[in-house]
Amino acid sequence: MMGKETTETILWDSFMEIGEVENLSKFNYTGENDTTSPTPPEIFYFARNFTFYSLAVIIPLGVLCNILGFMTLLTAHFRRHSSSWYLSALAIADTVVLVTEFIRKWLPNHRVGLNWYHTSTGVCLPVTYFSLSFRFISAWLILLFTIERTFSILYPLKARLVFANTSKAKYIIALVHLVGCVIGCYMFPFVTIYEDRTISFCGMDPHKSALRRTYNYVTLGYLCLACYLPALLIFGLNIVITTKYCQQRKQNDKMYARSTRKRSSNSRLVDNGRFTVIINRAVKNIIVCVFEVQHK
C-alpha cells in the first residue's frame, strides 16, 4: 500500500509527463481499490491543452531563433567579442534544453503517442542527463554574460583588459560545460524506468522510499546550483546595473542642464554683440552721410 504523498506524486507525474488525464481514474489518494477516485477538475484539462499547444509553438520557434542567433554570432564581426561566444554557447545550450523538453513533455502526450521517454531506458537516461546538464550550463552562461556586462558598465577600461580576450571566454565556456556534464551525472543512480499499475514512468521510483529521500536532497542541491544561486546573483547584478544607470542618468542630466545654461548665456552675449556692431555701423554710416552732405 502506498502513502498519500507517494500516490499524489504518481498522479501528478501521470498528468504532467504522459498527459493522460483519463488514466487518473485508475488511481486514488488512499491507494485502495475503492470507488472514491478523484475526478480531475476542469483546470487539469485546460492546463493539459494549454501545455500541449504552447509547446508546439514555443519549442520550434525557440530552436529556429537559437540557430539563427548562433549563425549570426559566429560571423567574423561578432567573433572578436567575448560576449558573442557566451551568447553562441547559450544558444546551443538552450536548443538542447528545448529538444529534451520536446521529447519529455510533448511527444508522450496522448495526442502524439510517442512515449519513448517513459518506455525506453535508452531514451530516458540520455534525455534526462542532457536536460539536467544543459539547464545548469544555460543558467551559468547567463550569469557569466551578466557579470561581463556589469564590469563593462562599472569599470569600462578594466573590463576591456579582462574580458576582451576571446581565448579566456572560450576557456571559461569549456569549464562551465565540463562542470555541467559532471553535475548532471548525479541522476544515473536514481533515474530508471519503473511501472505502476501498467503505466511506465521515467524517473525516481517512489516505492524506494530510502533511496528517494537521498534523491530529494541531491536534487535540492542541484536546484540550488543550477537555478536559485544563478538567479539570485543575476538579480543582484541587474540591481547594480540599474543603480549605476540611474546615477549616470542624473549626472548626464546635470551636465546637460549646465551646458544648456552656458549656451544660452553665450547666445545672449553674441546677440548683444551683433546688436552693438549693427548700431555702430549704423551710426558710422549716418555720420559719414552727414559729413558728406555737409561737405557738399
Image (cartoon, rainbow, N blue to C red):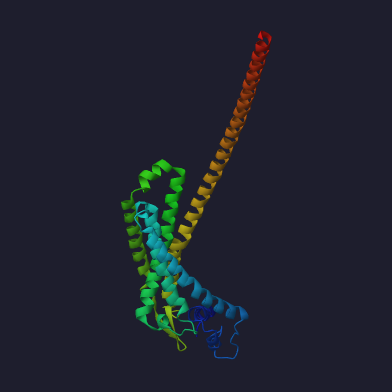
Q: Is residue 220 visible?
A: yes
Q: Residue 170 falls in which quadrant of the image?
A: bottom left
Q: Nearer the viewer, residue 240 or 272?
A: 272
Q: For the view shown, which residue lies furthest in the front direction?
A: 296
Q: Quadrant of the C terminus?
A: top right
175 sits left or right of 208 in the view: left
Q: Position of residue 181 (x, y in %)?
A: 34, 65
267 sits left or right of 148 in the view: right
Q: Position of residue 291 (x, y in %)?
A: 66, 10
Q: Nearer the viewer, residue 284 or 237?
A: 284
Residue beneath the point at 62% across and 28% down: 265
Q: For the view shown, which residue lies furthest in the top direction?
A: 295
Residue beneath the point at 46% across and 44% down: 154
Q: Residue 41 falls in which quadrant of the image?
A: bottom right
Residue beneath the point at 59% across and 33% down: 258
Q: Residue 264 falls in which quadrant of the image?
A: top right
Placement of 61 over or under 142, stated as above or below: below
Q: Position of residue 46 (x, y in %)?
A: 59, 78
